[in-house]
Structure formats: C-alpha cells, structure tokens
Image (cartoon, rainbow, N blue to C red):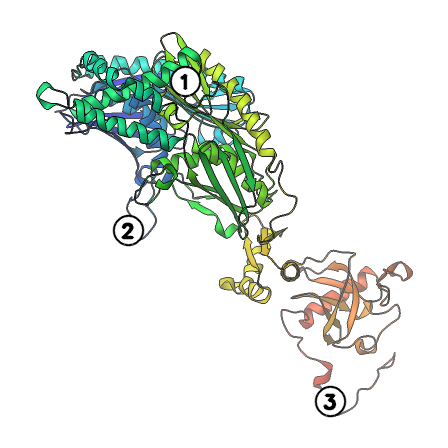
Amino acid sequence: MFNEIKKEVNWNGKIITLETGKIARQANSVMARMGNTVVLCAVTISPKAPEGVNFFPLTVNYIEKYYAAGKIPGGFFKREAKPSDNATLVSRLIDRPIRPMFPSNFHNEVNIVCTVLSYDSSNNPDIVALVGASAALAISEAPFLEAIAGARIGYVNGEYILNPSLAELKNSKLDLIVAGTKSSVLMVESEAKELSEEIMLGALNFGHSHCQVIIDAINEFKSEAGKVKMAVVAEENSALKKSISDVFGSRIVAAFKKQAKQERAGDLDMIKSEILTQFVNSENGNSENKVAAIFKDLEKDVVRGDIIKSNTRIDGRAPDQIRQIKAEVGILPQVHGSALFTRGETQALVITTVGSSRDEQTIDGLEATQTKETFMLHYNFPPYSVGETGRLGTPGRREIGHGKLAWRAINPILPTQEQFGYVTRVVSEITESNGSSSMATVCGTSLSLMDAGVPLAKPVSGIAMGLIKEGLNYVILSDIMGDEDHLGDMDFKVAGTKDGITALQMDIKINGIDFVIMEKALHQAYNGRLHILDKMSEAISEARTTLNGNIPKVEIINIATRKIKDVIGSRGKVIKGICEATGVLIDINDDGVVKISSNNPEATQKAIAMINDIVFEPEVGNIYEGPVVKVIDAGAFINIANGRDGFIHISELAEYRVDFVEDVINEGDIVKVKVIGFDKKGRPKLSYRSVDQVTGEDVSHKFPAQSRDESDRDDRREDRRGVGRDREPRRDRDDFKPEEPKKRRGFFS
C-alpha cells in the first residue's frame, strides 16, 4: 500500500531520519525526525504561474501543534489559531535560505507547510523543520537549484556545541542558526553575549561544516525518491534590453544621481511607466512582466556598475562611509524614556515604558511550562514611513522579525531582575525608512532605555552591511540604503557594544559568498559600529542615575517562602488590604521576592512595615517593645509585632519575687522585653526584668538567671492550665469573688 523511502544519518551522535511515501502522499512530503521531535514538511507547487505575477510567490508556514508536547491550548476555543511570534519567526527562518535557491524567472506559486507533530525539549523543531523542508523541495518537481541544511550552534566554556538542547542554551553565550548550501552560507540568525568577530566567524564555519553531512544525505534521498524537475527556460532578451537602454539608459543614470529618495523614486517610476507604454506589445511577445524585468536589470546595471567600477555609491559615499547621524533623547515629556535616532533618511522614534512584574508577558509554547518575559520590544512600520498610502493592520512577519532582531541585540546587555526588578516595554515607531530601520531601532532602543534610567550595561548600536559582487570583483558596503539592499547581493546586519557582538543576521541572495568576504564584512561592520556609538554618545553615553520621575519606584524585599501564605492571606485578603491601605502595587514571587511599586515613598515604606510585621520572626537576645495585651496569674502576654505575641512568666518580671503580675505591669502598658527562648510550640518566652525600661539596655547580666528546674516546672504548670494564645486559661483569679477586693497573699498563706 505504501511505497516508503527512508534515509537515516548520524549527525554528531544524533540520528536524523527523512521519510516519504506514507503520510500526505498527494503532496511532496517528508517526515523529518530527530530524537522524539517529528515535523511533517509538505510542499505543493502550482503547475503554472499566475497571470501578471512578476515575483516568486513562495509561502512558508511553520505550525506548532500543542498535542506535540502533550498540551491543550489555552483560551476559550481550545484550538490553535493565530500563529505565535515564535512560529512566525521560524517560518521566516525557513523562507530566507530557500528563496534564493529558485531561478529568478520562476513565478509559480510554491507552498511549504511544516507541522510539528511531536516535540521533545532536547531537539528544537526549527532545525528539523528546515532540514525537512529542504528535503521535501529536493524530491519535488520544483526547480530547487541546490539542497540546503541548517544547524544551531551554542558556545559554552570556549567550545562550540552543535544543536544544543534548551538546557544547554541557558548556559551558552551564543544562540546562532546558520543555513547554507554545499559551498556557501545563505542565512544567519543569532544572539550573542558580546562575542568577538573571530568567535562569531568560527561559529559560522563550525555550523556550515556540520551542515555538509545533512546536505549529502538529502542528495542521496533525492536520488532515491526525487521527481523530474520542472523546466524553466531563460528568455533571450538582449535585443529588447539594448533597445530600452538606448532610449532610456541615460535617464536612468540621471535618476540615480538624485540623492533624495522620493525624488529618485519619482523619476524612476515615471521612466518605468514610459518604458512600459512604449515597449509592451503582446503581438511580438513583449509582455508587461518581461519589460518590467528588463527595467529592473537596467537599474541593477547602473547601481552595481558604478560601485564596482569607481567605488562610488548612489549618494556619492565611499563603500565604508556612514550616513549623517543625529541622536536625541527626552523628546517626549510624559513618557518614561524616549529617543529619536536619525541616520540619513532612516528614522526611529523609540519609547520606553517601565512597569511592575504584573506587566510581564506570559509566553505559552510547546515547552512544559509557561515562561514570563520581562523585556518586550515592538517594531511598527507604517506606510507613511516610505511615503506611501496603505491600510494599518496587525503586525506582519516583517514587523515581528525586525522587532525580534532588535530584541536580541539589546537583551544580552539588560540588567537581571535581581539588579532591576522592573518590566520594560520598548516601542519603535519607524517614521522614515531608507535602509536598515531594524538597526536604527537598536540604536534608538539603547538611547531610550538609558534616558528612562534603565541601567543598561553598555550602549548598543547596529549597522547593516551590503555587498555588490560581479564575478571575482566585489565591494562591501557599510550602512546600506534601500536601493542597495534591493539591488545588492547581501543584507548583513551586525549589532553590539564596543566590546563585542550581541546580534547578527545575514541573508545572502546569491550562492557563492565565502568566509573571506564575511570576515571582511564583520571587521568593516566593527568600525561602523564604533562610529555610530560615538555619535550616540553625543546625546547620552550611559544610563541616567535615577529613574524618570514618571516611573513608579519599585522596592524589593525578601521573605521566607513559608510566610508567603501569611502575606497573601485567605483569597488574597491580607495583601489586598495592604494595597488598599497604602495605594501601592505588590507582587510576590514563589521564591519569596516581594516587589512593592509606588510613586509615593511614604506609602512604600508603610507597606514594607506592614509586610515586615506579618513575617516577623523574633530572635533570642533581641529586645522588642509592645503593649501588654493580657494578664493572667502566671504572667502576661506582650504583642511584640503585628499578630505575634510572647509570654512573660511572672518570675521574669523583676529580680525579686512578684506575687501579683499587676504589681509590675498592667494590660495596655507599653513595655520593653527581651526574647530569652521559645516554648515547645515555638512561642517566644520573654523577660521584663532583663531590660532597662528607659534606655532599652539589656541588664540581664546584673541578675541571676532563673533555675532550669524552676523554669521547666513553670512550663509544665502553664501547659496544664492551658495558658497560651491557642486557648483560654481554665480559670482566672477574678472568677471567684469579683465583688470583694483582692487580698494580698502572704508568704505562708
């Protein structure tokens, strides 16, 4: 019934399996497995290109099914709906190295769906999905030029780790994913803890070398299960291209001389419209798509030709020159922190908001437990930022991806929760864009956080690098503009401090970039990064020493975990009462960390005092002051803290024998007492005679201690009579003859 074909390969001690022919047989499907993580990758291709489409309509969907980890989705409907941010990011991760592996004139729709069917925490499904998608394309009829593979790299104790588990990543200074072909790297995504260019390059080399065994396995799998590839014939357009160039070539060159983006784009749109009007002719086969493709080739020739020949860019800059930079902070009066970062025609308005732990974001994924995120970074790209009209909707894949890249760049430099017990949200509003708005977001976020007073360890900047490569000749570009990105061969983003890289992202559009080029790009990016940091320091060079006055101040105290229930109270009654009485916000962690946030220092201190009273634990030898709450024959009860009483035996009232407790103290008196021990129920035993009531000085050394026999006898007597806070004494002296005055008992009475 099934024509199953299976391929297994040992990948650095882990077995990865590729299987086809059993599940989803009407698609080009591969079941990819590593450990107990299983991903079904299905590829479908439309038989012909849609009418009028002049781009490659590739769609990649990575789908997380909660049943894969033995979980039921949260929410009312209990089914997977909108993809999580992580699913969106993995979809982009798979798309980016696959897209360059199709012919430029292939316009058929291709759909890739990667569904996580089984998940174990030791094998991350994103790498399994990437390998499975590559294998499914390899055996399909799609004109997939060359098999790719990807790997995750960690860095622990100076050594690289291939495909680390989630537990290993917690101790890693690096989380890097690299994907590529047999000969070159196509895609990189990473977060690092200030690692050097040499370490990052070593990680790329390490990962790419370990991808080779997977690429070989996919090629062997293809030889057994592969279909015949669709034929894609390149059209001969040289004559038409020459005709268009003869008429419009000089105007295209003149348009690219204009440095203002809107002027340049307006001229090019006008030229393109005239070319389409003049040269589109269905009778001789000159379709609109065909003519438009030739116009794009002419644009490439102008931009790339000038750079290769003269090292001169569109705006006249040298290859390593950065555009003019202006950094400003504190431009919005009411927010917690703000910055405006402008680089050329790219601008980011970045706002920081600081909140309490109740503002944490709950992340629910395939992992066994929910996680809490205390740092959020959201990136918005409205159409007006590029001078266009359009509707505003929910964040798309681009917004989520750019925001996550900036998040990775800043996250390694943020203080820990122990150092800074706040939740931080940053929003980057892109108000202008002409290249690398994600790196402008990194710079603006660093400035905005420091303006708010968030103790950022060091400022972070980011730069986007480009590449123009023709044959053996190439030029590396610093701080690329939109046209250089659109018409170039590489988009290489590097972010970090003056001491190391914190994030790196690379997308290669051609197959053939070696490690020599990447090494030069990294070192050129380092110089650009330092230049940008210098410009940023003109606005602010380190975090403000005090928080913005609009931010609620957070005080952190620690209590014993066994006392958490006492502070919260039944159904939260106690903690709600403290909040209502003081006006503060209180959050308690399971480890006993209590965070009190308020703009009123007096209210904060009042709340802390109330909590301290609840969790109070008396210590032997300490002296406390409090009211006498009850007097009995054997002694008296003293409230030494809110809700905590101690007992003074009558023998501890004075250095002489006391017949009546009331001869020394009475109910309602405020007295100073010393803790001299605890009874078997843990209740404090107190001494009045050991404390000077005026100075509070310990004077126990002046009086002989009560004998142990006498003390033990008194304890036994106390237990027999039922003395204590837990129960009332069985009888009281006043119960006998309340109408008669008390008589003093003599020594022999």
Mark in the foreground, 3 or 2: 2
Q: Does residue 366 appear anywhere in the picture?
A: no
Residue 606, percent across and down?
65, 62
Name the secondary structure under disc 3: loop
- Neighbor class of circle 3 (other Cα within 10 Å; few <14, some 14-19, many 20+) is few
| Label 2: how many Cα within 10 Å (few below 14, some 14–19, many 20+) | few
Q: Position of residue 254 (x, y in %)?
A: 35, 22
Taking the image as shown, residue 311 lies to the left or right of residue 598, namely left
Amino acid type, residue under disc 1 in the picture: Leu
Q: Which residue position holds label 3?
A: 737
Earlier along the polypeptide chain: callout 1 or callout 3? 1
Q: 561 or 407: which is nearer to us?
A: 407
Dot 3 amino acid type: Lys
Residues at marks 2 and 1 touching, judged by CB atoms closer than 8 Å: no
Answer whether labels 3 and 2 touch (C-beta < 8 Å): no
Q: Mark 1 points at which residue?
A: 467
- Which circle marks residue 34 in the picture? none
- Residue extending furthest bottom? 739
Question: For the residues carrying marks 1 and 3, which lies nearer the camera in this image?
Answer: 1
Report the amino acid beneath label 2.
Answer: Phe
Q: Residue 77 carries which label?
A: 2
Q: Distance between the residues labelled 3 and 2?
A: 73 Å
- Residue 573 in the image, given as x and y percentages of width and height: 52, 65
Q: In this view, does 362 lie to the left or right of 576?
A: left
Q: Distance between the residues labelled 1 and 3?
A: 105 Å
In front of the other: 650 or 60: 60
